[in-house]
Image (tube, rainbow, N blue to C red):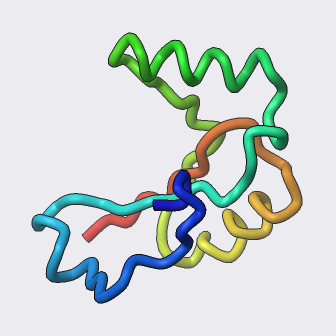
Amino acid sequence: MSLSNQWTVRDFSPNEYLPRGVRLAGYFGDAADLPREVFQEILDAVAAGSPAFPVDRVYDGLESVQRAHDDMEHDRAIGKLVVRVRH
């Protein structure tokens, strides 16, 4: 929806709308936030049906969420940050 400049979805309830096991994520930046070459690589990968986003770091356990969030907020990662939770 944000590509249409509508930032909210009326009456949207993710728990009712998304099937079990599906995750919802979002990017709230702008194309200008990415170097042109990087943005083009992402577009090419999506067009080819093979987007692959690098994982910068994996954190273990919920106790590491604060560190992961701090790393994200302070741009200490190039790629996705993953928090692994074990049962």
- Quadrant of res 34: top right
Residue at horizontal 40%, vertical 77%?
Answer: 9
- Quadrant of res 19: bottom left
Residue reaching furthest to the bottom: 11
Residue reaching furthest to the left: 20
Percent coordinates x, y for residue 63 in the rendering? 57, 78
Which of the two residues, 41 or 75, is positioned nearer the viewer here? 41
- Quadrant of res 57: top right
Residue at horizontal 45%, vertical 59%?
Answer: 25
Percent coordinates x, y for residue 32 in the rendering? 83, 39
**37 to 87, vertically: above or below:** above
Percent coordinates x, y for residue 39 in the rendering? 69, 25
Which of the two residues, 86 or 47, is positioned nearer the viewer here? 47
- Horizontal arrangement in the rendering, residue 17 relative to residue 65 (left or right): left
Residue reaching furthest to the right: 74
Residue at horizontal 27%, vertical 78%?
Answer: 14
Quadrant where the image shows the C terminus: bottom left
Percent coordinates x, y for residue 36 in the rendering? 80, 21
Residue at horizontal 42%, vertical 16%?
Answer: 47
- Horizontal arrangement in the rendering, residue 28 relative to residue 35 (left or right): left
Q: How many marks on residues?
A: 0
Which of the two residues, 12 or 65, is positioned nearer the viewer here? 12
- Horizontal arrangement in the rendering, residue 23 relative to residue 47 (left or right): left
**26 to 56, vertically: above or below:** below
Quadrant where the image shows the N terminus: bottom left
**68 to 11, vertically: above or below:** above
